[in-house]
Image: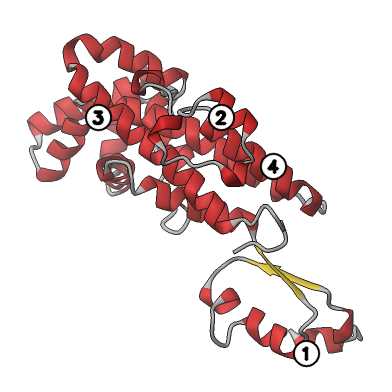
């Protein structure tokens, strides 16, 4: 870095701030770029990448969801990526169910938010995929095919995918804004506050959300929550849950809503722990 500045005749004293993703190489406690820079130029303001922090928020929140949801995305992609013959057979199912002839996507291993596109693709192809794997599991039984079919036939899988699509769009919208080439540091605090409040409104009492500073909200206080049945999980998931409630049973529906609420709670806790809203530049 110093050599590059010297090559372009830029004095190092001109540096007033440094921002990057939050990997150990860049922001680790020992011998990272940020620490070496700070040790030599103590006045430099260090700012972690807000987009990378939101990715970490989503990754931690996702641990509250059944692992099978993410596994389904990866398993379906792996099934088709290994065989052009399977892809050709599936095209017939796409044509029969009037599904767009699109390939299933693989979620990036290092970016959990990339799962949104995969989730949306699965939802678009859900009926065609279910019929395809029903036939495939019967003609070519295997642990992988059976696992995929069992997941697709579980109606709560669709509800979880719809919930994820709704939540990941919210987080990705924040990231798209701050991936702009324009300087938007002045918008960081209000956008973070807006994000926290929008998540909180899905399961907390509106009057409390409106009257409390976002960094002071306590999402773990059940006394501040709306009744479980009023937890908002997005239009798609809500419609699916209404369809299956009569056959699924109240206990299963409550378990789904509780799991989704835990995702929302963890999202807020992670945002609050990583962004200091009293001083937006002090991003943890």
Q: Which residue is mark 2?
A: 208
Q: For marks 1 and 4, give the one nearer the viewer.
A: 4
> Label 2 vs label 1: CA separation?
53 Å
> SS at mark 3?
helix
Q: Say if mark 2 contacts mark 1, CB within 8 Å.
A: no
> SS at mark 2?
helix
Q: Which numbered disc, 1 or 4, marks the residue that appears first in the sequence? A: 1
Q: Which numbered disc, 2 or 3, marks the residue that appears first in the sequence? A: 2
- Of the 4 image quadrants, the one containing the N terminus is bottom right
Disc 3 residue crowd, few under 14, some 14–19, many 20+, Cα 10 Å: few
Q: For marks 1 and 3, give the one nearer the viewer.
A: 3
> Label 4 vs label 3: CA separation?
31 Å
228 to 194, vertically: above or below: above
For residue 255, the mark is: 3
The percent position of residue 246, horizontal first and vertical second, equals: 21, 9
The residue at 68%/63% (across/down) is: 282
How many marks on residues? Answer: 4
Q: Which numbered disc, 1 or 3, marks the residue that appears first in the sequence? A: 1
Q: Which residue is mark 1?
A: 3
Q: Say if mark 4 contacts mark 3, CB within 8 Å.
A: no
> Which picture quadrant has residue 84?
top left
């Amino acid at each position: 870095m110093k050599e590059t500045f010297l090559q372009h005749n830029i004095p190092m004293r001109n540096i007033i701030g440094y921002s990057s993703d939050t990997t150990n190489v860049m922001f680790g406690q020992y011998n990272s770029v940020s620490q070496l820079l700070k040790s030599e130029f103590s006045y430099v303001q260090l700012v972690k990448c807000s987009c990378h922090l939101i990715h970490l928020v989503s990754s931690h929140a996702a641990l509250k969801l059944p692992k099978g949801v993410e596994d389904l995305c990866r398993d379906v992609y792996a099934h088709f990526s290994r065989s052009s013959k399977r892809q050709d057979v599936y095209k017939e199912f796409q044509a029969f169910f009037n599904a767009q002839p699109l390939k299933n996507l693989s979620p990036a291993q290092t970016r959990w938010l990339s799962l949104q596109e995969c989730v949306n693709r699965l939802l678009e192809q859900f009926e065609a995929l279910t019929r395809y794997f029903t036939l495939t599991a019967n003609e070519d039984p295997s642990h992988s095919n059976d696992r995929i079919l069992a997941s697709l036939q579980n109606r709560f899988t669709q509800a979880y995918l719809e919930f994820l699509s709704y939540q990941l769009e919210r987080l990705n919208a924040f990231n798209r804004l701050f991936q702009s080439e324009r300087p938007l540091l002045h918008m960081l605090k209000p956008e973070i506050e807006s994000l926290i409040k929008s998540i909180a409104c899905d399961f907390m009492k509106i009057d409390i959300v409106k009257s409390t500073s976002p960094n002071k909200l306590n999402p773990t206080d059940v006394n501040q929550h709306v009744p479980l049945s009023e937890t908002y999980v997005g239009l798609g998931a809500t419609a699916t849950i209404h369809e299956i409630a009569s056959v699924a049973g109240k206990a299963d529906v409550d378990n789904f809503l509780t799991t989704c609420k835990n995702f929302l709670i963890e999202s807020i806790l992670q945002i609050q722990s990583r962004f200091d809203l009293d001083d937006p530049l002090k991003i943890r």
